Image: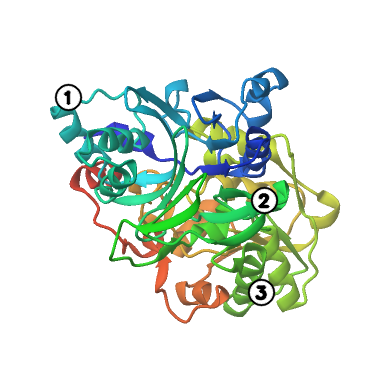
Amino acid sequence: MLPEIKGLNEECGIFGVFGHQDAAQLTYYGLHSLQHRGQEGTGIVVSDGKTLKGVKGEGLVAEIFTADAMKELTGSAAIGHVRYATAGGGGYENVQPLLFHSQKGSLALAHNGNLVNANYLKYQLEAQGSIFQTSSDTEVLAHLIRRSGFPQLKDQVKNSLSMLKGAYAYLIMTETELMVALDPHGLRPLSLGCLGDAYVVASETCAFDVVGAEYIRDIMPGELVIINENGITSERFAISTTKAICTMEYIYFSRPDSNIQGINVHTARKNMGKQLAVEAPIEADVVTGVPDSSISAAIGYAEATGIPYEMGLIKNKYVGRTFIQPSQTLREQGVKMKLSAVRGVVEGKRVVMVDDSIVRGTTSRRIVNLLKEAGATEVHVVISSPPIKNPCFYGIDTSTKEELIASDKNVEQIREAIGADSLTFISVDGMMKALGQEGTNGYCLGCFTGNYPTEIYPDTLQYYYQK
């Protein structure tokens, strides 16, 4: 068993700027807009053209980047990162961007995703003399680059990226260049924008709106974009590519004001709610959504059914997402702290509760109880994702298979476990229809169907499917 694999799972956000005098400040605001993607650690590395310097820490963006800290970050290029850690994967050393210094120059890396062959590569690299300073799979790329025999950095990076398997959106910065890379399946979102003569890169387009940048295009699967004082160029490091964007980006992770591959997240979620109204017509008095990521789907369900939408659940905005807390104990406590039911809305009513997913069942059970304790006579749960039956190997903390309630329970058993009067999950076909797609091509549905776009290495399977 290789327990460190769980510590490699990170749903993160990355942001980069090249060619702007206020690069660090722009990165701060960009990371702030991506804070929903990770709340346990953040960092920024800047380049003044000669040296790389970074500030990072465990905490929120506003906590780490104080006025004094920002004074240290001067330069016209910067990359930043927000992350959360699963059990065993925390610690200051794992906070990104990772910064390396050598006789060949400095290198900073920021990564969103998860490498399924990280341990395989680590074994090989350690046998060749590499010493790893972190438990993060991100560091693997740095060792591969520095061990590459190609004379030019561009070719070193392309050769190293071709060895990686899994999901990765990388920002790679030296003293004079910013490189942007996306895995051959495009599992994670990554977009390119501009702000005057400067270039901006972000996990989500909502970050462009915050800093005033203009969206140019999405980074393509298997593409390496190189930005330096001579401008911007694009190269391919993977000839064979099959797009498979993670569907959970639309369902849960991304902000509703972001666009992913030309699809607005709010619109996609609203369409999922409308599709649920077709698949789960329920006689009820009120529709409510679980804040925040389910509000759009709840509005769509209410519009399609004609049942009034009401704010039946209130979120304490000072408590983070329960799904990205590092332990089950904190996760359960977080649910109790972050939500409360509005008695005046739900008392004596038949309630349709719209949520985006059921992972372990803890949150859903607690919310159903909250609504019934507040006087709801019936609570009907509709979910805008199919049942999550399988672990995600690409950077989302859906943990081991045995912790996923849908892995060994059918819909009726899950309904009974969460205490709902009825339970409906959107169908895979319905979800794709809501995304404007006729089939599943171009999307990863591994956590729903068990069909993954990449090879999954045996040591990874051994951990995630342990019983």
| Viewer-proximal residue among 189 and 447 | 189
Q: Residue at x 58, y 35 (%)?
A: 39
Q: Secondary structure at mark 1?
A: loop
Viewer can see residue 287: yes
Residue 51 vertical placement versus 435 (above, below)? above
- The N terminus appears in which quarter of the rendering? top left
Viewer can see residue 444: no
Going from N to C along the chain, the mark reached first, 2 or 1, is 1
| Viewer-proximal residue among 152 and 377 | 152
User: What residue does disc 1 label?
Assistant: 129
Residue 291 vertical placement versus 218 (above, below)? above
Query: Badges 2 and 3: C-beta atoms under 8 Å apart?
Result: no
Name the residue type under label 1.
Gly
* Picture mark count: 3
The 10 Å Cα crowd at callout 3, few under 14, some 14 to 19, many 20 or more, is some
Name the residue type under label 2.
Leu
User: What residue does disc 2 label?
Assistant: 195
**Residue found farthest to the right:** 344
Q: Secondary structure at mark 2?
A: strand
Name the residue type under label 3.
Ile
Distance from disc 2 to disc 3, alpha carbons, whole Å, reads: 48 Å
Q: Residue at x 50, y 56 (%)?
A: 189
**Which label belongs to residue 282?**
3
